[in-house]
């Protein structure tokens, strides 16, 4: 069965697309990307893309920062993604990966050229987290500061920072890493934002502490405030605060909402997933599967055109 991708304005069979080994994106990491999920629901037999518009708004913001000028609007990218999902006809949860990049074969790593391309491919993906809860460690690698590489972009080259952090902690027997920034404040995970529950408040690092402004992060903050009545605070967090937290958890497109039960061999709370995280996780999955009417605008139905038109 053929897999289809979107490339250079067309939906093509994946095997028809090839990139040069000289391509700047391959040689220098001159690109940016998004991670989006479309959730399959057995009960309704529907596939729903989660917050497509917000992800493509962020992609175009990343492109602007990196001088990658792709000729598509947010609406056009959303429409192309819906068409691609329908063409592949997946009946399972799917990861959507748009990549905008410099496709030139020129030797120079400059961003100042006109070979701008976008590719969108799909990957069936159920649960990404390998465990029900994670034991993590603070990595010795620092988060890249914004004035070295713009952390608000999902720049492809920047993920060597994430890879090195994950490698270090995995080799030391942990499940995932937590970054500190160059000021010593807690930043985020290699591919996830972080939340702390303390004194009946939900606390997360501010954007100024070198984090990606996560779309799942934003969703978690809305659900905590609007549905659970929890005060949400964005402020700097120190490493030692993590150890005394009532709860900790990650959020992200791939990681979704995943509890952290220990940091640096220190048990968080009683060492099991906490109540706040569990409630937010349940709410999050209700939203992604279209079961929470208040957040129906966050999901785009793929196969059920009647439902789509009703929105």
Image (cartoon, rainbow, N blue to C red):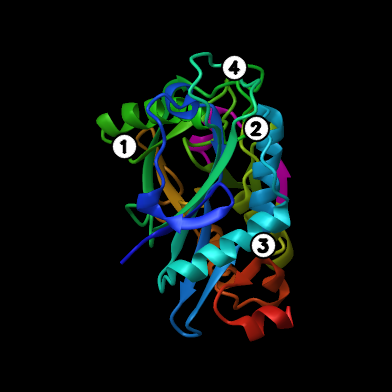
Residue at horizontal 72 percent and vertical 58 percent from the top: 75
294 is within the stretch colored magenta? no
Bounds of the magenta segment: 232-248
Label number found at residue 223: 3
| Mark 3 vs mark 1, CA separation in Å | 29 Å
**Nearer to us in this view, 311 or 270:** 311
**Nearer to us in this view, 102 or 293:** 102
From the top left corner, tell me how far across and down residue 191 is, in percent: 48, 40
Secondary structure type for disc 2: loop
Secondary structure type for disc 1: loop
Asked whether the residues under the numbered discs 4 and 2 touch, taking CB atoms below 8 Å apart as contact, a structural biologist would say: no
User: In front of the other: label 2 or label 1?
Assistant: 2
Q: Is residue 276 above or below residue 288?
A: above
Query: If the image is split into quadrants, where does the N terminus sit?
Result: bottom left
The quadrant in which residue 209 appears is top right
| Mark 2 vs mark 3, CA separation in Å | 34 Å
The first of marks 4 and 2 along the sequence is: 2
Say whether residue 257 is visible. Answer: no
Side of 204 relative to 36 (left or right): right
Q: In this view, does 148 lie above or below 40?
A: above
Asked whether the residues under the numbered discs 3 and 4 touch, taking CB atoms below 8 Å apart as contact, a structural biologist would say: no
Residue that mark 2 sits on: 68
């Amino acid at each position: 069965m053929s897999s289809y991708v979107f490339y250079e304005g067309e939906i093509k069979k994946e095997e028809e697309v090839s990139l040069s080994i000289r391509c700047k994106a391959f040689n220098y990491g001159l690109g940016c990307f998004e991670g989006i999920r479309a959730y399959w629901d057995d009960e309704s037999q529907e596939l729903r893309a989660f917050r497509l518009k917000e992800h493509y708004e962020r992609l175009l913001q990343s492109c602007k920062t990196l001088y990658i000028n792709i000729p598509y609007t947010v609406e056009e990218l959303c429409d192309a993604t819906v068409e691609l999902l329908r063409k592949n006809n997946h009946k399972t949860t799917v990861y959507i990966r748009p990549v905008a990049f410099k496709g030139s074969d020129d030797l120079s790593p400059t961003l100042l050229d006109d070979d701008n391309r976008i590719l969108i491919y799909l990957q069936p993906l159920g649960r990404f987290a390998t465990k029900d809860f994670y034991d993590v460690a603070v990595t010795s690698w620092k988060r890249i500061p914004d004035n070295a590489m713009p952390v608000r972009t999902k720049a492809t080259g920047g993920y060597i920072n994430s890879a090195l952090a994950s490698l270090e902690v995995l080799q030391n027997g942990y499940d995932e890493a937590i970054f500190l920034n160059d000021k010593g404040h807690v930043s985020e995970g290699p591919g996830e934002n972080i939340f702390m529950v303390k004194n009946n408040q939900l606390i997360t690092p501010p954007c100024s502490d070198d984090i990606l402004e996560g779309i799942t992060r934003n969703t978690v903050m809305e659900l905590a405030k609007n549905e659970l009545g929890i005060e949400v605070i964005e402020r700097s967090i120190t490493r030692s605060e993590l150890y005394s937290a009532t709860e900790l958890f990650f959020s992200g497109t791939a990681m979704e909402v995943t509890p952290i039960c220990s940091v640096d061999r220190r048990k968080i709370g009683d060492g099991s997933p906490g109540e706040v995280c569990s409630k937010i996780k349940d709410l999050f999955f209700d939203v992604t599967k279209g079961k929470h009417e208040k957040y129906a605008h966050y999901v785009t139905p793929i196969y059920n055109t009647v439902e789509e038109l009703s929105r």
